[in-house]
Amino acid sequence: MLNGAIDYWCNAFFPDREAAWRQAIDNQGLSLKVYRDGDEFCTPAEMVARMDEAGFATIVVVASARFADPTIDSFEHVAARAHEIASVTAAYPGRFAGLWSVDPTTGADGVAQAAEMVEQPWCVGLHNHTHSWDRPFDHPDFVPFYDLCARHDVPFVMQAGKSGGDFPHECGRPEGIDAPATDFPAVRFVLSHTGWPWTEETIERATRFDNVYLGTATWPLRRWSPELRAFATGAGRHKLMYGSGFPTTGHRQAARQFADPELIEGFTAADIERITMTNARAVFTRLP
């Protein structure tokens, strides 16, 4: 079992989201599984019990505004809402936190909304589902959101690499972080989803820039590449963070895999603690 683990990217796990996830995945013809025995969609109380069993202290849930007319495939269609995160964080102090997912097309109104959200006690950072908007990380529309992160000392999390869905992919290339990382040295940027298939390029950015980190959301330990594993125990030992990307992977699944002697070969107990807890706490400084 893990001990005090942090999941930096968990999608809405509430039972009423399961149908929406299945609908979106089926519509895009993906082979993703959204159900695993023991890691299914559940109530907050059930999730807390699962976290206790698996060794998770806190999970960070992504929330966004509801579109007036969201498409069935959009990430925003299945995301949590701000009021839901506020409710679960109040009911279970310290066990849940939230990321506010920004819409870069909304201009000043979106920045004002994001500013309101980072003032909320549940919000530990900003987020962008890159492929929903087809904008690289260095697009001018993101600049005011990065500036907001710098002023409030919160990180910005974005999906790097290709999306599993029917979305534009080039916007997720890790090279797009070069200018933001340089222009906003106080902002902690998290390139999520390992940056696949450009994982090596993502690792290079996380190695070169002090303020760029790498997250594993949706990628279970058994699928980590040799390069990613080497990064986790070498140059990136303070830069790699575990994320579930639920429902793509789950918390009991993570606990089992981090206890599997074959899968953790080459990892020390200190390595696992950094990957699953310490590094996330260094990035998400608002976590209790």
Image (cartoon, rainbow, N blue to C red):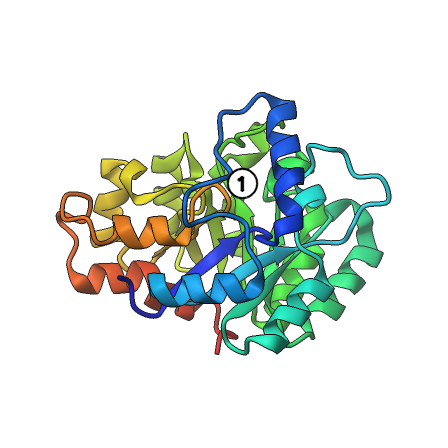
Disc 1 element: helix
Position of residue 218 measured from the top left corner of the image (x, y, whole percent): 44, 42
- The quadrant of the rendering that contains the N terminus is bottom left
Look at label 1 and name its amino acid.
Gly
Nearest the camera: 197 or 144? Answer: 197
Considering only vertical position in the picture, is 147 above or below 258? below
Residue at point 71%, 67% (across, down) = 117
Left or right? Give the position of 287 relative to 12.
left
Position of residue 36 measured from the top left corner of the image (x, y, whole percent): 43, 41
Label 1 belongs to which residue? 176
Residue at point 62%, 28% (across, down) = 167
Question: Residue 150 falls in which quadrant of the image?
Answer: bottom right
Left or right? Give the position of 122 relative to 278.
right
Q: How many marks?
A: 1
Nearest the camera: 165 or 30? Answer: 30
Query: Can you see residue 103?
Result: yes
Q: Residues within 10 Å of mark 1 (few under 14, many from 20)?
A: some
Query: Can you see residue 238?
Result: no
Residue at point 39%, 41% (across, down) = 219
